[in-house]
Amino acid sequence: MSEVNKGPLAGQRALVTGANSGIGAAVARGLAMAGAKVVINYVVNEPDAIKLVNEIEKSGGQAMALYADVSNESDVQSMFSGMIEAWGSIDILVNNAGIQRDAPFVDMTLSQWNKVMEVNLTGQFLCTREAAREFARRGVVPELSCAAGKVVCMSSVHEVIPWAGHVNYAASKGGVMMFMQSVAQELAHLKIRVNGIAPGAIRTPINRNAWETPEAEASLLKLIPYERIGEPADIAKATVWLASDQSDYVTGATLFIDGGMTLYPGFREGG
Ligand code: BGC
């Protein structure tokens, strides 16, 4: 048996949305190395999704790429039926797909507002609903996990930190927090666990302008007491834990993985 087949998620089937780049790609790798078969969902850049599938397979894992715009109900339903047809069911959903469409508030267009809400919040609704239907239908499979299913909702420190110039994004993440907690409350009796991860500044394409020059990086680091920018792998490790039975009594929780960004760093000297 390879290492992958002995991992904490051995035999489980996971779907990661927006898995062809950034945090999603790292999470998909992490779940695969922990033994899960992983659906790499993508909406653009199919070649990157295929590349990741090949990379995971080369390391002894199993993966497949499936297209869906997470904000489109019929796309999401076809993706879930494709996965269930191929692998029988689903055990883990990671709602990772997310976008920014930044603008000063007074200039923000309705389409910038709607697009961010549709992907970041409606997308989590549509995917979680499909996963929950399947978890509830199938119930607990004790050989695989104590839970009937696990959902990890990728949020942001901006579920609690207001963010000027990014009102649509912060509002969507505040929504993700209350969405995650309410679904967790409603589905816990079915042995379905729903948790959130709130990453801080993680080095990915979404915030490239915040770290790519030395000046930008220095000003970003002032917001991070731990004095380093996060790496996608920091998020992947926590996702594996939240998806595994190691966290079996954890539901409705948000894990902040932010190097202390939410600790009001200005108060180290001020106040
Ligand atoms: C945003 C990044 C930002 C980080 C910290 C994330 O949710 O997507 O652009 O750097 O929060 O502010």
Image (spheres, rainbow, N blue to C red):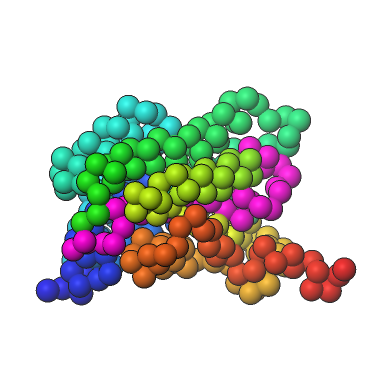
Where is 101 relative to 149, above or below? above
The answer to whether residue 136 is left or right of residue 208 is left
Furthest-top residue in this view: 110
User: Where in the figure is residue 233, as x and y percent of width and height?
Assistant: 43, 66
The answer to whether residue 242 is left or right of residue 254 is left
Q: Is residue 143 magenta?
A: yes
Q: Which residue appears at 40% of the width and 46% of the height?
A: 187
User: Where in the figure is residue 246, as x and y percent of width and height?
Assistant: 36, 70
The range drawn in magenta is 142-169
Furthest-left residue in this view: 1
Furthest-front residue in this view: 189
Furthest-right residue in this view: 271
Q: Which residue appears at 60% of the width and 31% of the height?
A: 112
Instruction: Say which quadrant the N terminus sits in.
Output: bottom left
Nearer to us in this view, 264 or 100 = 264
Nearer to us in this view, 207 or 85 = 85
Quarter of the image for residue 136 reads: top left
**Number of numbered discs:** 0
User: Where in the figure is residue 217, as x and y percent of width and height?
Assistant: 65, 64
Q: Which residue appears at 73% of the width and 34% of the height?
A: 105
Q: Which residue appears at 71% of the width and 48% of the height?
A: 162
Where is 192 relative to 5, above or below? above
User: Where in the figure is residue 115, as x and y percent of width and height?
Assistant: 53, 31
* Residue 42 visible in this rendered orientation of the protein: no
